Amino acid sequence: MAAALIASPVDAALSRKKVKAIARKVATQVVIERADEVKVAFGDADVVISSTTYTDIAGASASVDVPAGSSGLIVARFTAETGAIGATGYLSVRMPIDGGEANPTGADTFSFDNTGSPGDDDFESHAMDRSRMVGPGTHTVQLQARVTGGSVNIDDWHLTVERILV
């Protein structure tokens, strides 16, 4: 199956509980009434990462809009199955929003998967969340990945991007 992008409305009562738990900025809780827009992209074909510089993952992006005169909180979530193939370091993943780093910062040090012991190339599930406050306009989250040596497979991945007006 090729990468897919889905947009759907979100039930306000359901999202209120979920968003309150995840919408925080520097240890301060942000009270959210509801998620206003949700976009989803996913893929189930193997993506082999062998570049030592960050590379866009094809199809793993989504854009959301913030109306004029408003601010929004973007929450991006990425899950995937990964497996090392003769890798000698780790797989680093980041989700820039409009090309800029999302919170928490320091994506270069975020290890999404590592090689472990020699021969330890089993597939495992991994996840990460990132967020950032944004102003009016169209905002794009683009998943990027790199390895520090060897290569790593990304499979059965899912990207969820939520926009909450604040």
Image (spheres, rainbow, N blue to C red):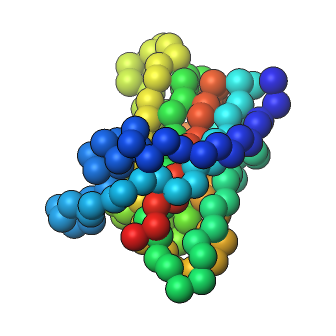
Q: On the rendered structure, is 48 left or right of 14?
A: right
Residue ID at (51%, 33%):
79
Residue ID at (27%, 61%):
31
Residue 127: where, in percent of width, then height?
43, 35
Q: Residue furthest right?
A: 2
Give whichever of 62, 65 is nearer the camera.
Answer: 65
Counting every numbered tag in the picture gives 0
Give whichever of 63, 80 is nearer the camera.
Answer: 63
Q: On the rendered structure, is 129 left or right of 25?
A: right
Location of residue 19 with respect to 44 vertically, above or below: below
Give the quarter of the image for residue 25.
bottom left
Residue ID at (38%, 19%):
117
Residue ID at (55%, 65%):
97
Q: On the rendered structure, is 119 left or right of 158?
A: left
Residue 146 appears in the picture as rendered: no
Location of residue 12 with respect to 163 vertically, above or below: above
